[in-house]
Amino acid sequence: MPETPTKSMDEIVALCRRRGFIFQSSEIYGGINGFWDYGPMGTELKRNLKAAWWRDVVRGENTGPHGESVHVVGVDCTIIMNPKVWEASGHVGGFNDPMVDCRESKARYRADHLTVLGASDASARLYAFIENDTDQRERAVKALLKYEKCEALDPARHIVRPFTQLTAADRARCIGPDAKDAGTLTEPRQFNLMFKTNVGAIEDPSNMAYLRPETAQGIFANFENVTNSTRVRVPFGIAQIGKAFRNEVTPRNFTFRSREFEQMEVEFFIHPSEATEWYSWWRDQRFAWWQSIGLSGANLQLREHDRDELAHYAKAGAGTSDIEYRFPFSAPGFGELEGVAHRGDYDLQQHAEHSGRRDKMKYFDAEKNERYFPHVIEPSAGADRGTLALLCEAYTKDESRPSGVYMKFHPRMAPVKAGVFPLVNKDGLPEIAEKLFKQLRKRHNCEYDPKQTIGKRYARMDEAGTPFCITVDTDTLTSQAVTIRHRDTQQQERMSIDAVDSWLSDQVGEG
Ligand code: GAP
């Protein structure tokens, strides 16, 4: 069993705010629950993640399970689509979470996230808390012990069970996570997660539309357009990066569960007979990709779903797995970063049926003279969860450094690739440093900083996770060499100023 990480989420959130990674949306007005803004550092970090995904998944030279070249093309679809799309996909009827309201605190919880602690006898008080929330759990334990006037939990008497198993009589004696009185939690009710809006000047049910809850359906709805307008042949993929919106009942854990977030999805269309090979290929490829960008330790795992966990579209498929990261708030458990699912031909069939384009939406293989609905393997990743995992993984305490902490980003992901400094802000050094900075900046995001002591400048760069600092000193005037300081080892080396540009490109790679 790998060790539980000791990183503090509060400290990571504080660093994100202090160094301009992530801010609360509309903070000056008190924020808005479930919405987050990226500051200058966070924007670069998330852009690097998305750019690496696009480069590796869409434009990468990948070899498939039978030695073939893997072909993926991109689309960029609208957030608001014809509402019939969401009827066909099953989201209008089935994209629901069971929700519980607290009449006292007005808080709302996902029923399947609530756990209840209490004695088994019918008159005892029950205390609800959000699963995996250690603070709430501790509060519930304390309150129970105080109420029952005992020192410690008694495993024979005190049991933990899901809130969804409670009867109405149980709920009447249950105290909600943020309540003082018993009986204030409602019965679970289904709540559709799609945000609604109106298209056009008049607010009327006839022009009601939804903000897309996943980017995938834009791809399925364009399947025929893409096959007709390009030379793609099965097997091939259509990729999309874009915003998705879900009116989550309980947005929480920083950006992990947000109401507005970005997805990076591929729908990979295959012949039904090849589902198993392609499913395994994508699952392994995606797991290796997250490792390649810095999540290589024990905090990353691949988890195959049990059959009873499978989504409606994946029931009869070759499999579904999650790539999971052990976030500080989920530890010792893991949270999902990406799902890889065999969706069968569910979506194409649904759209063919609902749009009335039955046979037209089928793929025609001219060589085999075969017309069929391809099956789909879907790797669906979250760009915000990925960014959050990179932040949590990078956060490294080091009391020996002035900053006390540094962000150990993979150089390819680091928001700033190099800091360029004149050792002193005079004697012709700033001019040389600025010239080098302007040259490097053409290809890489770099920062020029002529102020403060060199130690303070290193500390700023350590907190931003900048892998290299390049210093121009008085020796540079004669030797034409600069000092490169490596973030992780803090070791320094001298390098000819002319060699720095191509050396830096080798270190950080391309986007
Ligand atoms: N098309 C399939 C699909 O949307 P999903 O598991 O619901 O599947 C895919 O979402 C990914 O989107 C998740 O693995 C996660 O990374 C991200 N995601 C989903 N809901 C999210 C939320 N509320 N906040 C942030 N990211 C979310």
Image: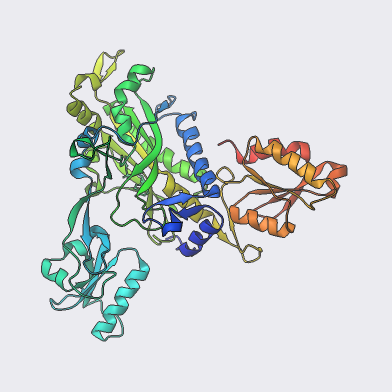
Corner quadrant of residue 79: top left
Residue 279 falls left or right of residue 489: left
Query: What's the coloring here?
Result: rainbow
For the C terminus, the image quarter is top right
Measured as percent of width and height from the top left, residue 395 is found at: 54, 57
Residue 304 falls left or right of residue 389: left
Corner quadrant of residue 378: top left
Q: Is residue 324 visible?
A: yes
Q: Residue furthest right?
A: 478
For the N terminus, the image quarter is bottom left
Measured as percent of width and height from the top left, residue 175 is found at: 23, 72
Q: Residue at x 26, y 86 (%)?
A: 149
Q: Residue at x 63, y 62 (%)?
A: 403
Q: Would you place residue 13 above or below residue 59 in this image?
A: below
Q: Would you place residue 112 above or below residue 316 in this image?
A: below
Measured as percent of width and height from the top left, residue 193 is found at: 26, 48
Residue 219 falls left or right of residue 147: right
Q: Would you place residue 323 above or below residue 405 in this image?
A: above
Q: Is residue 488 visible?
A: no
Residue 184 falls left or right of residue 422: left
- Residue closer to the observer: 267 or 136: 136
Ligand 1 occupies quarter: top left
Q: Residue at x 51, y 63 (%)?
A: 11
**How many labels were placed on the picture?**
0
Q: Residue at x 29, y 30 (%)?
A: 220
Measured as percent of width and height from the top left, residue 306 is found at: 26, 49
Q: Would you place residue 127 above or below residue 436 in this image?
A: below
